Image (spheres, grey):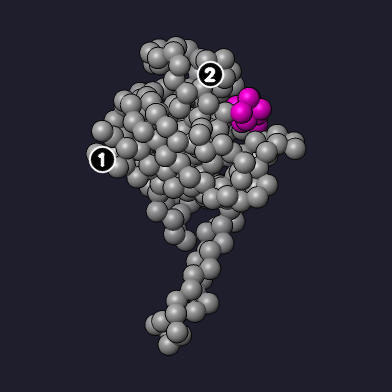
Amino acid sequence: MRIIDLSPTLSPATPVWPGDPALRLTHPASLARGDAFSLTELTMSAHTGAHVDAPAHYVRDGAGADVIPLETLVGPALVVDTGEADIISAGVLDGLAIPPGTTRLLFRTRNSARGLMVSPRFHTDFVAIDAAGARWLVQRGVRLVGMDYYSAAPYDALAPTHQILLRAGVVIVEGLNMMAVAPGGYEFICLPLKLKDADGAPARAILISP
């Protein structure tokens, strides 16, 4: 059994979405300073690093991260490589030979080939799913989508893709480091923090390969 960690390491150097609060780690108590224990305080957006988008992120009165069903977040998943595609459209999806009945679909795109998830700066020219691609996924019963950068939607067209997927109950997992992942079938486990009514939550995500 091989475990592949998809969650990038978080630090104050971690890039964040433009306008989001930077990740901060402070130490109110420290053994090195003579305190009886060490204590770390963490401040960051719920959409930093590997994270799950809840319906509340783009759907008014949508559900929060605390009620996303664990059954959707754990189970068999298919990793597909989109090659040199600049956008994940319905046409691109048609060409990926995704088996009927696939419910968890993780995309390894040019984002991974370019190493965007380990880049020290934020990129806006990432590969993502357009609105037609999102409708394709919903129509074929996909219940979870995983992306290898900070958004499932293009930087300049965020709302349509998110709304189509989230309104249909599709769970979106973003910020996955897929650089070391080959296409194929895996067991996927993604456990977001149980933040009440939150529009998203940081997560630890892994793949298990037999």
Q: How crowded is mark 2: few (under 14 residues within 10 Å), some or many (20 or more)?
A: some
Give the x, y percent position of residue 33. 43, 85
Q: Which mark is residue 141?
A: 2
Is disc 2 placed on a helix, strand or loop? loop
Q: What residue type is labelled 1?
A: Arg
Place residue 78 in its image quadrant: top left
Residue at the spot 49% in from the left edge and 30% down from the top edge: 145
As for residue 161 lying within the magenta part, the answer is yes
Residue that label 1 marks = 2
Q: In this view, does 76 lie above or below 10?
A: above
Q: Which residue occupies the extreme right position in the image? A: 61
Give the magenta-colored segment's residue range.
159-169
Q: Camera-side residue: 22 or 107? A: 107
Give the x, y percent position of residue 97. 38, 13
- Most frequent secondary structure within the magenta stretch: helix
Q: In this view, does 3 lie above or below 37?
A: above
Is disc 1 placed on a helix, strand or loop? strand
Give the x, y percent position of residue 151. 53, 37
Q: Camera-side residue: 31 or 122? A: 31
Q: Residues within 10 Å of mark 1 (few under 14, many from 20)?
A: few
- Asked if residue 21 shows in the view, the reply is yes
Q: Which amino acid does label 2 sit on?
A: Gly
Task: Name which of mark 2 and mark 1 comes first in the sequence.
Answer: 1
Give the x, y percent position of residue 99. 40, 14
Residue at the spot 39% in from the left edge and 82% down from the top edge: 32
